[in-house]
Image (spheres, coloured by chain):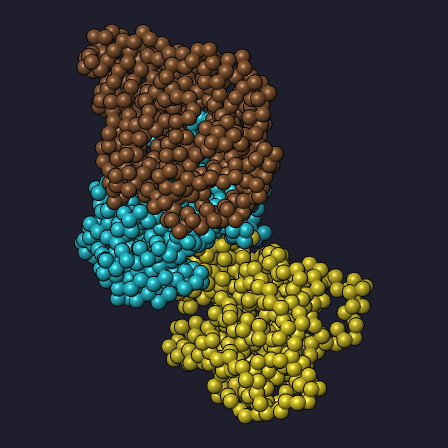
Chain colours: A yellow, B cyan, C brown
Amino acid sequence: MDLARSAETPSPDALPCADGKLGNYLSGDVPDENKWADCVHCGLCLEACPTYLETGHEHQSPRGRVHLIKAVAEGKIGLNESFMDPVFTCLDCRACETACPSNVQVGGLIEEARGQVRRAHPLKGWKGWVSRFFLHGVFPHPGRLEMLGKGLRLLKRSGLSSFARRIGLMKLLPSQLEEMERVTPIPGLPVRKKLPEVVPARGKRKERVALLTGCVMDAVFGDVNEATVRVLTRNGYEVHIPRSQTCCGALHVHAGDREAGRELALRNMEAFSDADHVLVNAAGCGCAMQEYPELFREDPALRQKAEAFAEKVMDVSRFLTRYGFERPKGEIRARASYHDACHLAHGQGVREEPRWILRSIPGLEWVEMANADRCCGSAGIYNLTHPEMAGAVLRRKMEDVPEDAELIPMGNPGCMLQMSVGVLREGRRSKVVHTMELLDRSYRIGDREGKEASSCSDGKSGGWILSSGN
Amino acid sequence: MFGRKKRRLDPLIRQLMEWVGETNVLYRREDLVAYECDGFTLKKGEARAVVFPADTREVAAVVRLLHRENVPFIARGAGTGLSGGATPLGGEVIISLVKMKKLLRVDLDNRIAVVQPGFVNLKLTQSIADRGYYYAPDPSSQYACTIGGNVAENAGGAHCLKYGVTTNHILGAEVVLPDGEVIRIGDEGIPDMPGYDLLGLLTGSEGTLGIVTEITVRILKAPQGKQTLLAYFDDVEEASRAVSDIISAGILPAALEMMDRTAIEAVESANFPVGHPLDIEALLLVEVDGIEAGLKSQVEDITELCRRRNVREVKTARDEKEAAAWWANRKTGFGAMGAISPDYLVQDGVIPRSTLPEVLGKIREISRDTGLRIANIFHAGDGNLHPLILFDERKPGEKERALEAGSRCLKVCAEVGGTITGEHGVGIEKREEMRFVFTKEEIAAQIRLRDVFNPGNLLNPGKGFPQPGRCAEVKQEIKERRMAEG
Amino acid sequence: MTAMALNDLLPAERISRSESSNPLGNSGDWIAQPRTENEIADLLRHADEKGWKVTVTGGGSKRGYGGLRERYDMMLSLADLRGVVEHRRGDMTVTVRAGTPIRELADHLAEHGQRLPCDPRWPGTATIGGVVAANETGPRRLAFGAPRDFVLGLRVICPDGRILRTGGKVVKNVAGYDMNKLFVGSMGTLGVMSEITVKLRPLPPDQCLMYLTFPEGSEADIEPFLRLLRSSTLEPFALEVLNPVLAEKTAGVNRYTLAVAFEDRSEAVDDQVKWVRDHLPEGIGMEMRRGEEALRCWEAWAELGPRGPEVPDTDSPAAAAKIGLRSTETVSFIREATEKASDRGLEVFAHGGAGHGIARIWLRGTREAVLPYLAELRSVVEERRGFLVADHLPFEWRKRLDVWGNRTIPFGLMKRIKDSCDPNRTLNDQRFVGGI
């Protein structure tokens, strides 16, 4: 990769330790000293880190990265490409935070460091193109996202893609994109297009909730969003889908574009200002929105606002187990093995909730996946920017996925795409699904069977409600 | 790959690359920074390069090259050591063994396993647990530390009270000597091979006598039953007397751990809290294991002994999950210090168990004198103390006071007939304190032994033994660094 | 050197000229009986300077163990250097002088409910120093480990008279090199141990020893039963396979026999005994000794093999060997050793630890019969990457059969260790592997 520096960006290598700055960092939004002060260099994070497991390199480990971030602050090393590589090779999977005995917020530090690097070295080349195309050209614009979804739908429906594949046209795409295209489902209509802004609850309204439809989720996995809405409404929740919502900004923050991240955060905080609960069915988005306060740590007023907002953000599985859901009755006879999305398990501590939900589905045979909370290598657009590492991480992940699992449920669209690539590469027969899809399917099967039996009255909700603390 | 003009490479680096491949040599400053220290962070140095050999042949080739070129070198595993054993002093080539991480063979019937040095300690137990076996030495860093590193440090752990330390579980090894010669000691895990106990000498030699490239370890059948107890005390002295009482009663717990109030505060405010009361002065975590039928009466005996020492509460873990949570809380205790203090220095003195109350009192005095908080998390059953001295490196003078407090703790241990390190090793950290326990002559005898294996002193130089005139140097160095840091 | 010179170092009654020799070799022209460390240091320094060769002895039980010298200039007897120096009961450690017989130490410890985790042969004769120098173990090694595992610290007198301390008095210690390992099992070739600090264990609340006898024709059942036992969660202290002649002496039955021992709280012992009963194949005889009875069995067992100081029968002297193998090969080895002996018209006593892989055999016979037998066994064992050390042979025989075997070991390194510690080869010259 070329790192020619443009005229307007100062070379940090050349910068002296000027006043008001920390070591070799650019002034403003510097990585938080208190975050690395918590690190005692014990190394218990090493084996949790997918990139350390692959490389064995200390600077590609959480401890090593924190050490490097500190070293820039100490003026030992510059804010240059050798610093950039480890900081950007991080998958931001947060597994280290789960392993860390002293609660070091590695993810936050990495994102802050990326912000510094991006300010010093704007991206060029392929990575720059991918990054700009998605982060600025697509994600913040629902319209364009829909276009992309539409295009994809057309491509798939028309059989053009298989034709293109046959004649080798698809080979022109980088292999990881080509595979990604192959595993992408025929997208359903985005719910923002299909559903009204307010979808009423079925029966008596218990709570009002707002749904973040997400970018990838809505464009590629619109069906999942629809399923989520059905699940929520059937359980007595009125679902609001604010039209002014936008991309959560996770990918921007991961990529170091914290300014764009802040912009999107502000738009969303505004769009969801009326909501009591902001529900998310994409782990990455949920985690990012809960971390909005991090983006405004230098602005107390906004920070406070962001904190209040973050309080309302919740993964849909956690919401359902906390506020109650009807026990599904429709049988799904299949062997399922759940994958913990990093930003659910490590990022939000949501581990048991999806399992409770899934295990309440009759007929589902449960196989616990080894290292279920190990990253699959998706990590936003990581699989596009670091295809080799992402591939290696995926290979290791697939070793842990039971061969005989027919369903692999999870709670994040990025993981769904990546794991589908894994299934494709390994020639497995497993189907990758979202937790909400399975729950919705069980409800629908149950309803159908209920009608066939034509006995039970409709009004009664199915007694067994999980409540928080169970 | 970064488009940087191909720099003129150090010819040594090029030669190393020829042996292990270009991607398996790190040499850029930024990459080396991450290797400037291990789990002991008070001393840092810059390595010349880091190499990642893939097998014994490559290790031997690299060592032969470095020996020929008279370049000092260090073997390194996960870098979780707590005494600076894997920290370069400056200019060494680090031979990282983390890519040699295979489990080569398991022979359950003969109860042995053969591993490469980079294989992670806990992985061994995880690989054989489904068949009811485990590997006994369990240092708190077992989630990450490698068995090669365990051999170098003769690692201990919570369960060595009953089961012994690493040296009691190593049955054979393939070793690359500092001149590149490869030797094998022990075979098929058969004990008592004729000849001097080279394996025993290598274990705990802190990587100064040779580099292990393959290790045969003993594995054990997991005990039939296990009971874990927590005893909360309102008085530290009573707790320490209870420890002696338990052992004197002829009970041999698998583990007998103690934490004091400050330590409890740390673990409860860190990542793995289990709800210990915050107003107790000490807790004992006791595990007895063995034949199920014999455990009940042991638990009763221990409970009774604690009662006689005015314990506030004794509870037995309801299930394995609860016991595991108690242990996770204990084992991440050092790291948990990060939650209540920016920096800590952990010491590792050992004392005769019976002097526990006296020594803990003296440690409290040291804490008062230096004005630094000292937490205690330790293996009470075998008298292995871990005073954790809390400080903030950013506050001028605190690091020096912490070092002084640490040294004084060790002096106390030596004075009551104990030693300066039970499992962390001497490394860089306790080089000077070696004088607390050994005479000049005894140290000279050890150096003569090193010369037999490592005549040029190229392998991990400057570790383990007092350096002539070092005390003054260190102080000077700290002063200089502080000034440089401004 | 003259008696005059030695008399300056030691009172006359404790130094004597000796003309007598022993067919086991390892005799001394002078026999010195120091009582203090300093006396040993003076004697050694003197010898080292004069180029004398010195052998060290305790109770003499290992007189026939290694050594290519019939006589040394001086035999240093530590028999007078005995007694407990410090027994820290609460710490479960004891420091004891090297010449203390094992039984004397055991009796002392038993009064306090403790014991040395070691059950060597001839505990009345063998001293702690000798047991440590030879890293000697008995059947209960399975639970006890070996001296290398329980020695915490030593005081050692170097050949040049320097006194060193190694290790310490606490149960965990990684300060400096583990110098104890230099001396444990080194057959007295590197230094003379004067004091030994060891880790103790509590006396067991209860114990039992079960003899399981396998009728003729059912020997093939032993290994599967052992495999079952080894893969169970039982915690046997001993798991020894005995050949018929040895079983006759110990259990009173002339059959292949498995000796299984448990030591624990009574409930736990009962539980394990029950397991064995429940899993025993049909037709296998079982006899059990409990408590004191078990203890007496162990004591009798320890006094079965040949022993050093006794002058051997010249027509048909005794020979013994220690064999190391993978534990799964113990049964087949014991049977092979027994059959190969009977092919040669020899009667061999043999037992082996099916949990730790150390086996012992002893027999009587002429040189022409015994040595080829041992050589044949050795080749069998070495083929399986094990070893056979002939740890009791008449001196003349040792010249014909290498006591230590033919396994390739890192000998260069060992020789450099010897040269570094004892450059003049003063101590136990040629007593150890490769003529060290």
Count every numbered label the image shows and give the total. 0
Where is residue B330 drawn, in percent x and y? 37, 57
Residue A70 left/right relative to A56 = left
Q: Residue at x 31, y 55 (%)?
A: B301
Placement of A348 over or under A53, stated as above or below: below
The reply to whether residue B93 is visible in this rendering is: no
Where is residue A398 drawn, in percent x and y? 62, 59
The reply to whether residue B224 is visible in this rendering is: yes
Placement of A152 over or under B227, stated as above or below: below
Residue A138 left/right relative to B146 = right
Query: Which quadrant of the structure image shows residue A162?
Result: bottom right
Where is residue C277 drawn, in percent x and y? 50, 46
Q: Nearer the viewer, residue C132 or C417?
A: C132
Assign the C terminus of chain B to one quadrant of the image.
bottom left
Q: Nearer the viewer, residue B48 or B120?
A: B120
Query: Which quadrant of the structure image shows residue B192?
Result: top left
Placement of B482 over or under B201, stated as above or below: below
Residue B339 left/right relative to C142 = left
Q: Residue at x 28, y 30 (%)?
A: C104
Q: Residue at x 30, y 41 (%)?
A: C114
